[in-house]
Image: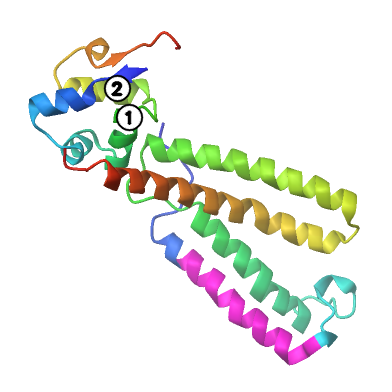
Amino acid sequence: MKTRFLFPYWCRYIGWLLVIIHIPVMVLKKMEVGNHFQGYNTGVNTGLFSPDHLFFIATAVFMAIGLFLVAFSKEKIEDELISQLRLDSLQWAIYFNYFLLIITLILSKDGAHILFLNMLVPLAFFIIRFRWKIYQNNRLLGRDGDLR
Amino acid sequence: MKNNIRVERAIKNITQADLAGLIGVSRQTINTIESNRYVPSTVLALKIARVFNKPVEEIFMLEDTD
């Protein structure tokens, strides 16, 4: 029942670091270019490793890799309950993502943003749901009086 | 599925943490099994039974709804 293909425990901290780094970079860049920023996919400046492309790498890709590491690193004690919670949460994340994807495809034609959303929502939702379940278990553990 | 791990632990006088340590899972897992929120795998059920030196059927029982 051991889950394979997980990153070591410490990868989670690298993941959070990447997610956190991404926010000030994003804010600074937005402040610098103001409203002139056209986004990577609009065709203004699309050369490989052009400033816009680098900006895209520094934000979206960092954040995606960060979330990925957070979501798929091992827990301290990786047992079958954790595997079960992980699978459940993945299922919820996929359901939620496709629900959102279908809604946005119906209501919007903004392909680039749909893609961007689609990149982050499954991982973000998975992390929130997984952590929430672990938090619930820990809370019940405290309430039941652990030493009896 | 019901279980009487809590009773067996009391007889053997070990805590949830002790039992968790003996079979290599987290305390949360033992707690969720005891409160019937999680059904353990066969492997884990057998390991628990081995700790208490009893057959699995004496620790885990089927209910009518199963």
Quarter holding the N terminus of chain A?
top left
Is residue B5 depicted above or below A60 in this figure?
above
**Residue shown at the point (21%, 43%) measured from the top left:** A146
Is residue A74 depicted above or below B51 in this figure?
below
Percent position of residue A143, x then y: 29, 45
Percent position of residue B63, x then y: 38, 11
* In contact (CB < 8 Å): disc 1 and disc 2: no
The answer to if A29 sits in the magenta stretch is: yes
Asked whether residue A72 is in view, the answer is yes
In the image: residue A133, left or right of residue A139? right
**Residue shown at the point (50%, 64%) measured from the top left:** A15
Q: Which mark is residue B45?
A: 2
In the image: residue B57, left or right of residue A88? left
In the image: residue A141, left or right of residue B13? right
- The residue closer to the viewer here, B7 or A61, is B7
Is residue B60 depicted above or below A84 in this figure?
above
Quarter holding the C terminus of chain A?
top left
Q: Dot 1 surroundings within 10 Å: few (below 14), some, or many (20 or more)?
A: many
Q: Which of pointers 1 and 2 indicates the residue nearer the eye?
A: 1
**Residue shown at the point (45%, 11%) measured from the top left:** B65
For numbered disc 1, what is the local secondary structure?
helix
Percent position of residue A6, x then y: 46, 48
Query: Mark 2 or mark 1, which is nearer the start of the sequence?
Result: 1
Which of the chains bears the disc numbered 1?
Answer: B
What type is the residue that disc 2 sits on?
A: Ala
**Residue shown at the point (20%, 37%) measured from the top left:** B16
The answer to if B29 sits in the magenta stretch is: no
Which of the chains bears the disc numbered 2?
Answer: B
Residue under label 1, please give it.
B33
What type is the residue that disc 1 sits on?
A: Ile
First to last magenta residue range: A14-34
